[in-house]
Image (tube, rainbow, N blue to C red):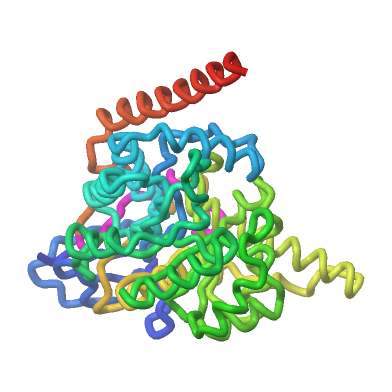
């Protein structure tokens, strides 16, 4: 099956092909066959893009998709409140069905917003049934995803160890690779959402790093937010030679400049969630520090229980915040603002395409409109009032585009959105999502009232 996208401004994000005015992209089956002009498209279905902008599918490198039914509940909570109310409260009330519906609807929303790839960081999976429900939700949505298998963070019951003392379960990794996530070329593949030295004992951290290395999986971990469980743990990780491009650090606050320089030099990637980090109190995003050391900056929504799931907004937030920090530093050090912007909009677009793909270990498959890569792409309707006139297509995408402009979304050659409408039927799912979220929140309030009465 062939599909020809014609009459488009094509932003390939590939330096060999660059930006094409009135360009074409030819898709055959699940791959991009050719990019250019006057392509031989015999037998192809022709999609007239009517002057719209064609871009690679966006990559949301870090999101806890299981929280979709909790949208808005944590909008006024700091990180410490979030730990208490969510991990030690709301999360403990999720059934596998709750995980399934939240993950499926959350992934569908990402497709609707133009994100074709998701780093789904699932750390509310107390049973294999919860894990399987999350994987099923991703697979049913049709999104491309790395399912980062994590571990829950409740308060331990009497006689139970703290979560920081529990190694990542080898048996679950083996089970998933032998079962639903066994195809390394599949739409949904496996990564490990490990605790890392900030949130686990050193013994557990070493075990988890080595486990990921053994199975050849990307290991992602949070860094920052309170005191480290294993102070100096990163030094030991380095000494054991466990750093590399397969290590992904989320947030990254509290790493010093020397560590960042060494980590970037060894290919460690960073997934930054600028809006949520500033909202909940992680600290300023470390975007500029990673850039200065030549590291990979990817971006993520992080928590839809706090903010919107729109990656265009995340990119604007990251760009604006870092420009602000750079401008302020220049004023303090030089007495004036910089002569020009310190970061171009093209780089911000790369953060949510190419660099997102690198962070997830998928750069050979997605992230640019390059012949041979998977046909993951998004057509933006740039004729709408919010984007006209288009003077610089890259800047228009980064600074003006929104969900309203996402006309069509394709993953591996298959449309999931056309003419501004998601092709999946979500009516029943929305009712289930609403019921799930309201029930969970009500159960937490009932539990808290009982606890107060008992005191």
Q: Position of residue 383 (x, y in %)?
A: 43, 50
For this view, does 63 lie left or right of residue 78?
left
Looking at the rendering, which quadrant does residue 39 occupy? bottom left
For the residue pair 81 and 201, the one nearer the viewer reads as 201
Residue at image position (34%, 58%) is 147
Q: Is residue 99 above or below residue 177?
A: above
What is the residue that sits farthest to the left in this orientation?
A: 43
User: Which quarter of the figure is the C terminus placed in?
Assistant: top right
Residue at image position (42%, 27%) is 440
Looking at the rendering, which quadrant does residue 20 occupy? bottom left
Q: Which residues are magenta?
A: 393-413
What is the residue that sits farthest to the front in this orientation?
A: 159
For this view, does 225 lie left or right of residue 446?
right
User: Which quarter of the figure is the N terminus placed in?
Assistant: bottom left
Q: Is residue 21 visible?
A: no
Q: Position of residue 106 (x, y in %)?
A: 37, 43
Count of marks overlaid on the render? 0
Q: Is residue 384 above or below residue 328?
A: above
Q: Is residue 374 above or below residue 243?
A: above
Q: Position of residue 60 (x, y in %)?
A: 44, 58
Q: Is 335 colored magenta in this rendering?
A: no
Residue at image position (66%, 63%) is 253
Q: Is residue 157 above or below residue 262?
A: above
Q: Position of residue 98 (x, y in %)?
A: 33, 35
For the residue pair 318 and 177, the one nearer the viewer reads as 177
Q: Is 399 colored magenta in this rendering?
A: yes
Q: Is residue 47 visible?
A: yes
């Amino acid at each position: 099956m062939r599909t020809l996208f014609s009459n488009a401004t094509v932003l390939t994000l590939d330096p060999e092909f660059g930006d094409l005015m009135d360009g074409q992209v030819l898709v055959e089956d699940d791959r991009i066959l050719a990019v250019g002009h006057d392509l031989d498209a015999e037998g192809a279905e022709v999609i007239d893009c009517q002057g719209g902008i064609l871009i690679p599918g966006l990559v949301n490198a870090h999101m806890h998709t299981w929280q979709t039914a909790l949208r808005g509940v944590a909008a006024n909570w700091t990180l410490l409140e979030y730990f208490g109310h969510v991990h030690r409260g709301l999360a403990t009330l999720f059934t596998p069905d709750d995980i399934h519906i939240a993950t499926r609807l959350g992934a569908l929303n990402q497709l609707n917003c133009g994100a074709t790839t998701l780093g789904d960081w699932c750390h509310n999976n107390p049973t294999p049934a919860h894990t399987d429900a999350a994987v099923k939700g991703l697979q049913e949505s049709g999104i491309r995803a790395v399912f980062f298998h994590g571990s829950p963070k409740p308060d331990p019951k009497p006689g139970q160890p703290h979560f920081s003392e529990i190694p990542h379960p080898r048996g679950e990794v083996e089970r998933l690779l032998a079962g639903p996530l066994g195809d390394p070329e599949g739409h949904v593949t496996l990564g490990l959402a490990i605790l890392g030295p900030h949130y686990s004992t050193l013994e557990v951290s070493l075990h988890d790093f080595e486990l990921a290395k053994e199975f050849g999986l990307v290991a992602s971990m949070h860094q920052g937010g309170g005191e480290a469980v294993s102070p100096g743990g990163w030094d030991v990780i380095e000494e054991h030679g466990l750093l590399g491009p397969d290590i992904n650090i989320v947030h990254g606050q509290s790493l010093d400049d020397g560590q960042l320089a060494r980590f970037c030099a060894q290919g460690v990637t960073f997934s930054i969630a600028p809006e949520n980090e500033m909202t909940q109190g992680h600290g300023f995003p470390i975007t500029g520090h990673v850039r200065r050391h030549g590291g990979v900056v990817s971006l993520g929504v992080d928590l839809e229980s706090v903010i919107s799931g729109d990656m265009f907004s995340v990119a604007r937030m990251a760009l604006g915040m870092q420009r602000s920090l750079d401008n302020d530093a220049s004023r303090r050090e030089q007495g004036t603002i910089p002569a020009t912007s310190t970061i171009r909009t093209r780089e911000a677009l790369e953060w949510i395409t190419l660099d997102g793909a690198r962070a997830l270990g998928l750069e050979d498959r997605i992230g640019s409109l390059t012949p041979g890569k998977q046909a993951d792409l998004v057509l933006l309707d740039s004729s709408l009032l919010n984007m006209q006139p288009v003077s610089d297509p890259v800047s228009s995408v980064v600074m003006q585009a929104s969900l309203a402009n996402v006309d069509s979304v394709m993953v591996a050659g298959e449309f999931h959105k056309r003419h501004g409408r998601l092709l999946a039927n979500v009516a029943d799912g929305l009712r289930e999502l609403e019921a799930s979220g309201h029930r969970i929140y009500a159960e937490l309030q009932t539990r808290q009232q009982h606890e107060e009465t008992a005191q």
